[in-house]
Amino acid sequence: MNITEIQDLIKFVAKSGVNEVQIEHKEFKITIKSDISVKRGRAAAAKALELEVQQMQATMPIIPMAGAPQITAPVAVQAEEPEQDSHLIEIKSPMIGTFYRRPSPDKDSFMEVGQQVNIGDTVCVIEAMKLFNEIESEVSGKIVKILVDDNSPVEYDQPLFLVEPA
Amino acid sequence: MFKKILIANRGEIALRVIRTCKEMGIKTVAVYSTADAESLHVRFADEAVCVGPPQSAKSYLNIPAIISAAEITNADAIHPGYGFLSENANFSRICRENDIKFIGASPEMIDSMGDKASAKNTMKAAGVPCIPGSVGILDNYEDAVACALEVGYPVMLKATAGGGGKGMQLCNDEEELADGWESARREAMACFGNDGMYMEKFIVEPRHIEIQIAGDQNGKVCHMSERDCSIQRRHQKLVEETPSPYMTDDLREKMGQAAIIAGEAVRYEGVGTVEFLVDAHRDFYFMEMNTRIQVEHTITEEVIDYDLVKEQVKLAYGESISGRNYYPKMHSIQCRINAEDPARNFAPCPGMITNYHQPGGHGIRIDTHVYSGYMIPPHYDSMISKLIVTAQSRDEAITKMSRALDEYIIEGVKTTIPFHQRLMQNEKFRSGNFTTKFLEEETI
């Protein structure tokens, strides 16, 4: 496997949302783990995972390799977050609606990765029935990851941000 | 036809609606509170979104959350089930404003039928028999006496702002009326700050018999015969059956026609129910109109062989009704199984169902959302299952219900199954000769 193929494989795994993939081939064995699990709504996550596994199995042979690769172990999914994330706090959505990162299309995002957030700071806007609700943080710390794309639907209790507490 | 319907409800009725939608090729969206994440309706729907925490006010009654859920899933219609927002005129209006079809009554219809006094006036004007009584509020004591003489004793003095049995007085003669006039008004003023009173003839030991109707947008209404719901505890129905053991062909014709007149008078669209009280002379009086699908719609479905939820969806889409009335071909009985302890005054018993096995066989239908290992949450009502049996005759239906109840295993929580088993053996129930007073007077 050349370096480009390995890079493509890594990008594919990262995009799929799967946490860990192991591939065994007579010439090599490769394990790819993504570092932070991406949480989604329960039903969506279960369906998405099924879909990714099917996609993975369908598309794997397309990556050119020396021989036919055998995926010996089924895709291993970590149910828990990797250990290093257990101290991070989630900011969860207090309502169902559409998540926006910025107050309006022409303005900057409320929060970026690495930014300091204090209790009471507005982290995002969630829109429901044409009403825009500013969501305030209940924790202080540093934004480590933004879990939802701009302009996408979110459910009640869905994790939006991961914060390293101060 | 609608492409996607969001079901704004939970439990067995959510599942009921999802099943019909699937048969119609319509995609389904379930909404759920965090307490219902493991519920069956969530699993059976094509999509499911969490709308709030366990409290109903913040989830199933949370209008912005429900509308938002419909927005993000692109649902083109909402089915509200029964209870919750099904007869909330505001919700019906907001659906309309947001271009989402509310599978139920229009806001104007809900408003007009929800106000009991105005509903009664509308019915009276249309020629539907109503409980005789005063026209509006009584002006003074003399007015009360005159009214009582006109309608005939016994009479009920009722507070216009009243509720929960407060500010009501039964008066058997003029002497009791004199006392009642003072005491009821005092109680009404104390409880509601308003001592306005009206009067209704007291219907002695009535039967609660309701007529199922369906109406389309062309103003045509038809009926699907009656359901007898007289077996009630504290105004909560426990057992329903059709046909009513008290019914005659003649009475059914009269009540069916009255229900059609009621529906057409208000240009009712959708499926609904007109509730009547029937007295010992087989005189019937309009009580109220329910502008939603009911818990006991099931027994009507079984005896006329008809999917009422499918009819609801089709009518909401603008289709026309067949134009026929429907009459029961069989006898059907429904027992509502609640997670309550009959031995402790029907105290609710939420908790884990450790073992569940439901009855089967010919003529058995179960509408339920529970399963073995299901945790009944404490936040919602206690009904966990509806056991419906259908047979050729009433006696056979009762025998079949007994047999089915004997097979029904629900362990881990107390249920009303033993109560229903005893009820099926009760002589008075078996005789078919009972009124709404039945459970007050009989010990089951």
Image (spheres, rainbow, N blue to C red):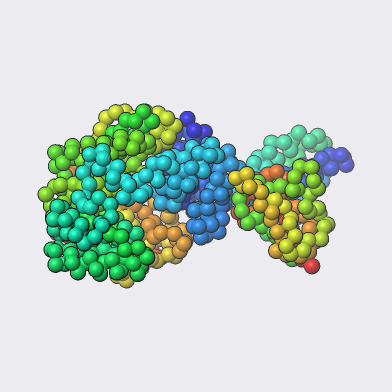
Q: Name which quarter of the figure residue B192 lies in.
A: bottom left
Is residue B359 in view? no
Report the residue at 35% width, 69% height from top.
Answer: B190
- Give percent across and percent down for residue A155: 61, 51
Which residue is farthest left? B281
Report the residue at 54% width, 36% height from top.
Answer: B99
> Residue A26 or B433: which is nearer the viewer?
B433
**Quadrant the C terminus of chain B occupies:** bottom left
- Give percent across and percent down for residue B97: 53, 39
> Residue B427 or A10: which is nearer the viewer?
B427
Q: Is residue A115 left or right of residue B399?
A: right
- Give percent across and percent down for residue B229: 25, 51
Report the residue at 66% width, 57% height from top.
Answer: A92
Is residue B280 in view? yes
- Give percent across and percent down for residue B135: 25, 50
Report the residue at 44% width, 32% height from top.
Answer: B317
